[in-house]
Image (cartoon, coloured by chain):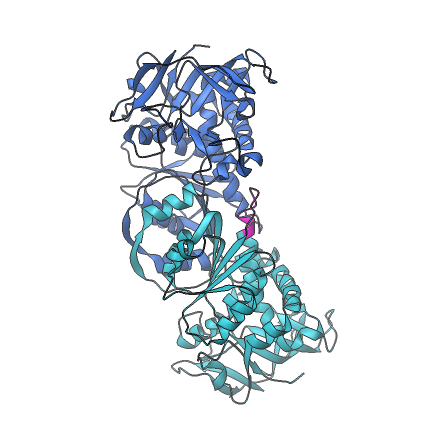
Chain colours: A cyan, B blue
Amino acid sequence: MRAVAVHRGEETPRVVEVPKPKPGPGEVLVETHRVGVDGTDHEVIAGNHGGFPAGDDYQILGHEAVGTVVDPNGTGFEVGDVVVPTVRRPPEGTNEYFERGEPDMAPDGRYLERGIVGAHGYMAEYFTSPAEFLVPIPESLASHGFLVEPTSNAEKALDHAFSARSAFDWRPESALVLGNGPLGLLTLALVADSFDRLYCLGRRDRPDPTIDVIEGLGATYVDSRETPVPDVPAVHEPADLVVEATGHAKHAFETVRALAPNGVGALLGVPEDWTFEVDGGRVHRELVMENKALVGSVNSHVPHFEAAIDSVAAFPDWFVDDLVTTVVPAEEPAAAFATDDGTIKTAVEFAPL
Amino acid sequence: MRAVAVHRGEETPRVVEVPKPKPGPGEVLVETHRVGVDGTDHEVIAGNHGGFPAGDDYQILGHEAVGTVVDPNGTGFEVGDVVVPTVRRPPEGTNEYFERGEPDMAPDGRYLERGIVGAHGYMAEYFTSPAEFLVPIPESLASHGFLVEPTSNAEKALDHAFSARSAFDWRPESALVLGNGPLGLLTLALVADSFDRLYCLGRRDRPDPTIDVIEGLGATYVDSRETPVPDVPAVHEPADLVVEATGHAKHAFETVRALAPNGVGALLGVPEDWTFEVDGGRVHRELVMENKALVGSVNSHVPHFEAAIDSVAAFPDWFVDDLVTTVVPAEEPAAAFATDDGTIKTAVEFAPL
């Protein structure tokens, strides 16, 4: 079958022929419909993230998939069920994090990630998965079901951020999302109904499709070249919730400055090492004197996928249409990995619906 | 009546004569037994913190008090009730934070603090307080009831830290307290029964009374001159919980390094501005990839006082005896503000029990 993989020493993913997988006991065979592309894929391609599957000199990409069950293999699924797979798998057998249903909380070394860390991804005509790692979704969501996985990551970040404010009567009104990439925009859409005032930070000139989406969601676009993060409180207002989805390390610290008292910052980006000067005294003091919190969040577990399914189902049609700018046939995947200012979210399509 | 106050332009607190306060409607008159001294008092004395009461060129010190009701003034209290006052008061009338019972979450400008910010403290023969800001304690705790307020601050920090881990099945085993001052040692005593392994960081040579207390609580003393915070994971182990009680701004960032995956750092110190280099990329990445959190916490509210009363009552006698090294008569308060390595917690005594 056809798959899209990155090879050791190569900088561009390409189509390869690999054997069609056979489901083992408890595993389901899924025919892939679409697989989304995100920043993590670009890190995998650049070799910055994860690691190749043991013994292979290539890695099949893709961790944001949607497909259709073609062989339930004795599990509770039925042929034709539309499913989204979770990403993490135990390195061998299982471990306590997987047994608790919280693989997203497993530390380094206690998980593989399909398409990212030590395991092949979903960017192939078929994939197999243990049934427990497949989440059924309504057929009506099949075309953009690949948005469920990234949305689930935002759901988890919000879950952890809100939990971090559960010790008191938190009444947030304003949210600021740092980053106008797909994850930032999905997060903005998630919080659009529950905050009175929304802001989203980017660094692009108008006209720009992400700015259109931001404003379509009722948010104010903040151009970081004019209004750096620490200036947001003075120019606009301090934010009760800040979600960092840029991977820019200075933003983790500037988030504290942008937060309103009692606010929480959810961090989602994964920067490289980078040493720089910080007014650490001020950051520390503001965290304490203003009861602020920072919560890092990676990956997600099944309940976050289930929440994400509801959220994706509730996204306005225009939002999904405008967000998914590019669907590329699996035969010619290169365009899915190109980035330009006209592109927001791209997916690779295998079997049509 | 006699009070201990710091005067504008002076560096040493001294005894002053001030009028005995008269309780207004809803207020109780309390005869002060003892008032604890902590780092915040030293900041108030040094002029680093808070502000003098409007119109006065002196501030009566003290926010960690215990006393006895002498005039209930028609409230629900009775003569002889032993009480501990909370610290924050509304600047005028009330506001939503006080109405919710969460003055500890009020931002700057929405509160005064007795003995710290814009209001006289409790270091006087008598004080008045609205009944709602007095917490009754058992008579058996009267002698060390001044430990309730600082303990309540640790209770709040732990409340917020645990809440920040409530979105998943957190199973902490190890705790590291940064700082062997009174707040650090009180925090260590609070968590002693609920963590399998305890560490407390200081920078003192043996023999030292704080090291004796640390080891008496079953904790390992970590000398920061030999084992800086970022080295704790390698030398000992990463900690599921880190509580920073040093006010050293670098510790806020080093806390992230010292945390185990899924751990939380509670920050309690209040440093001045201080710019320094941080490997911000690493801090940011570790927060995200290891699901770590940082929670700043200041002050506390009545339920934290109530929790603290139970905790103080459960402290072993030896711990209280060893912690409270110094009780100074109100006539000669200077010794209460002296610091030397033989001193841990000091209090000023007004009326004996």
As drawn, A213 above or below B121: below
Q: Residue furthest bottom?
A: A331
Percent coordinates x, y for residue B173 in the rendering? 50, 44
Q: Is residue A87 visible?
A: no
> Who is closer to the viewer here, B218 or B171?
B171
Picture coordinates of residue A25 (x, y %)? 67, 71
> Quick one: B247 or B331, which is closer to the camera?
B331
- Residue A17 or residue B294, whichever sits in front: B294
Residue A125 sits above or below residue B343 on the image: below
Whether B224 is among the magenta residues is no
Quarter of the rendering occupied by the N terminus of chain B: top left
**From what the image shows, is residue B159 above or below residue A225?**
above
| Residue B174 rendering spot, x and y as whole percentages | 46, 43
Q: Is residue A119 left or right of residue B119?
A: right
For image coordinates 51% across by 42% down, the residue present is: B160
Give me the residue at 27% from left, 41% from top: B225
- Report whether residue A104 is seen: yes
At 36% across and 48% down in the image, what residue appears?
Answer: A283
Q: Which residues are magenta?
A: A162-171
Count of numbered badges drawn on the protein: 0
| Residue A348, image x, y percentages | 55, 82
| Residue A195 figure quarter | bottom right
Magenta portion: prevailing SS class = loop
